[in-house]
Image: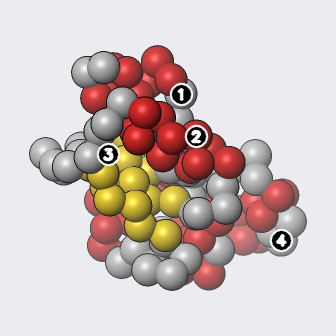
Amino acid sequence: MATLYGLPTCDTCRKARNWLDRFEVPYTFVDYRASPVPAATLKAWAQQLGGWEALINKSSTTWRNLLPQRKNPGTDPEWTLLLKEYPALIRRPVVLQEDGSVSVGFSDNGFKKLFGR
């Protein structure tokens, strides 16, 4: 069973959840504002995705409103602190597969490949 991390009010997360429901893919949804993701998990996701940049939604209003000095964290602890403070910066949704693989974002074709539908 996959775990979908996101925000319940996010349109992209809603689309992803609707897709999973339509194709009867079992999943668990985790609201990462209500259940914050541990720093070690965020770091592991970033490593799997190829770096922190792949995990961050730089097109979000939250990112655009950050002070310039906050937009260039230099260390893993700085990144995790930023994401703990601003969970909306995490690209949505984050999909964690049973095998531990991680992907971010939603597209119909991407989910078809990811879930073999």
Residue 58, percent from left and from top: 70, 49
Relative image position of residue 75 (x, y in whole percent): 48, 69
**Residue under the image location 20 percent in, 49 percent down:** 1
Q: In which quarter of the image is the C terminus?
A: top left
**Label 3–label 2 contact, CB within 8 A:** no
> Who comes first in sequence, dot 4 or dot 2?
2
Compute the Cα span from label 2 to label 1: 9 Å
The amino acid beneath tag 2 is Lys
Amino acid residing under circle 3: Val
Distance of mark 3 from mark 2, alpha carbons? 18 Å
Position of residue 64 in the picture relative to residue 43 (left or right): right
* Mark in front: 2 vs 1: 2
Find residue 15 and name its label. Answer: 2
Indicate which disc, 1 or 4, sits on the residue closer to the N terminus: 4
User: Mark 1 or 3 closer to N-term?
Assistant: 3
Residue at point 32%, 59% (across, down):
28
Which mark is nearer the camera, 1 or 3? 1
Residue at the location (31% across, 36% down)?
A: 24
Q: Mark 1 = which residue?
A: 107
User: Which residue appears at 37% of the width and 21% of the height?
Assistant: 112
Q: Label 4: few (<14), some or many (≥20) within 10 Å?
A: few
| Element on which disc 3 rests | strand
Which of the labelled discs sits on residue 102, or is there none?
A: 3
* Amino acid type at mark 1: Ser
Q: Given this view, does label 1 or label 4 mark the residue nearer the observer? A: 1
Say whether marks 4 and 2 touch (CB < 8 Å). no
The foreground one among 81 and 13 is 13
How far across and down, in percent of the image, does residue 95 sit? 37, 47
CA distance for labels 1 and 3? 15 Å
Residue beneath disc 4: 67
Which colour scheme appears in the figure? secondary structure
